[in-house]
Amino acid sequence: MRSFPALATLLSLLGTTLLSACGGGATSGLQPPPPEGPTTLSADNMLDATGVAYVADNQSYYDYEVLMQSLDSLRTLLKASGSAACPGGGSVTLDWQGEVWRYTAQNCKLPLLTLGSGSISIDSSQRASAGSKLSLKDLVLPGFYADAPQLVYNAQYQIELPIADVEGKSLSGAMSVSNGAATRYYENITHSRRPADASYQRRELNIRSPRFPYPLKLTVIETAQSNGRSFVVSAEDGSTLTVTELGTSRQLELRSAKSVVPLAIRTISAAELAAARSRARQ
């Protein structure tokens, strides 16, 4: 189970900073095309839907965590406006104006990844009343995935102010990820936590992927108290796909909006899931 180490570090940083791609305004690459039609999940497409949903969760959450940990590395390199060499080669430039910090990469090789080009911005100008903001602007990650040689990330995230003993959004926003040939859009992203249960995480997002013809919604709940993870993909017609982890395999259960009993059940191997995820990244 994953925690939020990068987020905790970032929140301490955001006592003096807040994120934006260009100090405000819309980030490029975040506008999805109009829907092609109403979503429906079926026995024929539930494996593809699973792959698309796993990729969406990876890119909107886990990739975000890695990027935030890389931001810590950038902060170590540069704490004032200027340029510096990166540990494995390349360089990074910091433009610090007021309470907006923008790091721009030039083939910057860090311990966890390489930032080919683009920027990561932090803006803390409204931290006391509205939390903090985080943006990725045309951020190119070469070689981050073996089956997707170069990905371009654009994102706008809002870090919510913590409220003691109350479940609420700790993170919200939108992201797009392009491989040059096609773009995935993730909207209405929310990450929620419970102060009383450090293991609890709830993640939700809307997905539009070129590898699935209709929009999807993903809801993931992780908590040690439930001894597992709930992973549910839903469609506009109310159909749902529940994915249950069975060791390295996964059990897929398809239900209609009005059905409690599964309409279809399928167990897939780790290799089948890996192939579905690889297709979803193409």
Image (cartoon, rainbow, N blue to C red):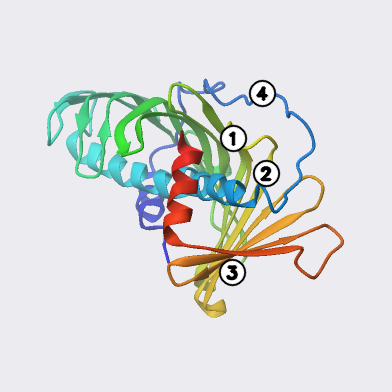
Q: Residue at x 54, y 57 (%)?
A: 162
- 10 Å neighbourhood of mark 4: few (<14), some, or many (≥20)? few
Number of the label disc, if any, that sits on residue 216: 2
In the rendered image, which residue does mark 3 sit on? Answer: 165
Contact between marks 2 and 1 (CB within 8 A): the answer is yes
Q: Secondary structure at mark 4?
A: loop
Disc 3 is placed on an element classified as: loop
For residue 231, above or below residue 183: below
Answer whether labels 2 and 4 touch (C-beta < 8 Å): no
**C-beta proximity under 8 Å, tags 4 and 1:** no
Q: Quadrant of residue 108?
A: top left
Judge by depth and name the residue closer to the eye, 190 or 20.
190
Measuring from the top left, give residue 147's x and y in whole percent.
36, 37
If the image is split into quadrants, where does the N terminus sit? Answer: bottom left
Label 3 vs label 1: CA separation? Answer: 36 Å
Name the image quarter holding residue 111: top left
For marks 3 and 1 on the same chain, the one whose residue lies earlier in the sequence:
3
Q: Secondary structure at mark 2?
A: strand
Q: Amino acid at mark 1?
A: Ser
| Residue 261 picture quarter | bottom right
Disc 1 designates what residue? 209
- Percent across and percent down for residue 142 are 29, 30
Mark nearer the viewer, 4 or 1? 1
Q: Position of residue 92 (x, y in %)?
A: 22, 26
Q: Amino acid at mark 4?
A: Pro
Could you tell me which residue is drawn at 42 percent across and 50 percent down? Answer: 62
Tell me what residue is drawn at x 40 percent, y 38 percent.
17
Pointer 2 or 1: first along the chain: 1
Helix, strand or loop at disc 1?
loop
The residues bearing labels 4 and 1 have C-alpha atoms spaced at a distance of 10 Å
Question: CA separation, marks 4 and 3?
Answer: 39 Å
Checking the image for residue 33, the label placed there is 4
